[in-house]
Amino acid sequence: MSRPPLLSVCFASYNYGRYLRQCLNGMLMQTFRDFEIVVTEDGSTDESRDILREYEKKDSRIKVNYFPENRGVMPAAQDMLSRVRGKYLYCTAADDFVANKEFFQRAVTALERDERPAGFYGICGIFTDELNKITGGMGTAETVGYNTPRQCCEGFLKCRSVVTSPSAIFRTDWWLGQGGSDIAGMLGTLGSHADYYLNHALAFKHGMFFDKTFFACQRVYEKRTNYSAVVDLWKILDGYAELEKQLRPHCVEYPEQDRDWLHWRAYWAQDAVNKSGHLYQQGMAA
C-alpha cells in the first residue's frame, strides 16, 4: 500500500451533481498537495456518477466508492470514514465548497507546529443557494491562534466561540476517538447536531487553533431555513437539550459555569422562538 497522505478529505453525495464541480475544484486548487479525497457516492440518479468518474480520471487522489443504490446518510458516512488514511481529517458536504487556496496548507502547518489543539478552523461563509451569494458568516473564537480548553468552553457558553465544520480540520485519531468512528450512532442520537457536538467536545478537551481568515462556504437553502414554514419548535428545543447533555461532561469547570449553561439554553431557546413565529400554532397558547 502507498504511503498514507497527510490529510484526508471526505464527503458523501446523493444527487448533488450540480454542486460537485465547485466542491472538487475548491479542493484541487489547494497549494497543499499531500491529501486524498475520499467520496461515497450514495446511489445518485442524477449526473453525479459521470462527474465523479471524470474527476477520478484526472486526479488519482480522488477515491470514490459507488453504492449501487441509495442507502442513506448513515451507511454513506460510515463507508467514507472507514476509508480515510490521513493524519488530519476534513469532513465536508458535497454542496459546500472551499474558497481559499491556502486553507489546507495553513491548517496542516498550524497543527504540525503545535501538538495541543484538536484542530484548526477559520471563518465560514453562509452561501444562500437561491441568491447565489454569500449572505452571512460564522466561525469565531476568544483569540486568534491557540484557544485553550477553558477559552473554548467559556467562549462557547457565552456564544462568543463557534467551531464550524466547513472551515475546520481535525486530528483524525482524536476526531474518530471522540465518537466520529460511530457516526451512525451519533446521527441517530444528535441528528444534525452530530458534527456540532464533535467539534466542540474536542475543543473542550484539547483546545483549537483559530485563524481569522475566510476559508470555505456552507450552502444553505431559503426553503429549508424558513423557520416559520418548517420548524417544529419542541423538536428544536429537544435537540439543544440533548446537545447540552452530551457536551456537559467534556466542559472545563470554571466559576459560574452553571449560570452560563442557563444563559446558553435561554439564548438558543429564544432564537428558536423568534425564528418560528408560530407560537400559537406550536401548542404554546393556553
Image (cartoon, grey):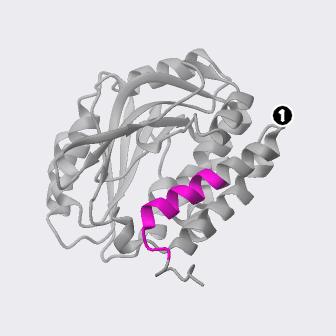
276 drawn magenta: yes
Q: Nearer the viewer, residue 236 or 113?
A: 236
Residue of label 1: 254
Classified by dominant secondary structure, the portion drawn in magenta counts as helix
**In the figure, 113 relative to 255: above or below?**
above
Residue 270 painted magenta: yes
| Residue 217, horizontal then vertical, whole percent | 32, 41
Q: Is residue 200 above or below residue 79?
A: above
- Furthest toward the front, the residue is 286
Residue 14 appears left or right of 211 = left
- Residue 22 found in image quarter: top left
Residue closer to the observer: 78 or 158 = 158
**CA neighbours of label 1 inside 10 A, class few (<14), some (14 to 19), many (20+):** few
Q: Quadrant of residue 266?
A: bottom right
Q: Residue at x 29, y 27 (%)?
A: 100
Q: Is residue 47 visible?
A: yes
Helix, strand or loop status at disc 1: loop
- 14 over 196 or under it: above or below: below
Q: Quadrant of residue 275?
A: bottom left
Instruction: Please name whichever residue, 212 or 62, is drawn nearer the observer in this view of the structure.
Output: 212
Q: Give the residue type that dot 1 points to.
A: Tyr
Residue 14 in picture, x, y percent from top left: 29, 66
Residue ID at (54%, 39%): 162
- Magenta segment boundaries in residue numbering: 266-279
Residue 4 visible in the displayed image: no
Instruction: Write the residue at 70% across / 38% down.
Output: 204
Q: Where, quadrant-wise, is the C terminus in this rendering?
A: bottom right
Q: Which residue sits furthest top?
A: 113
Q: 54 and 264: which one is in front?
A: 264
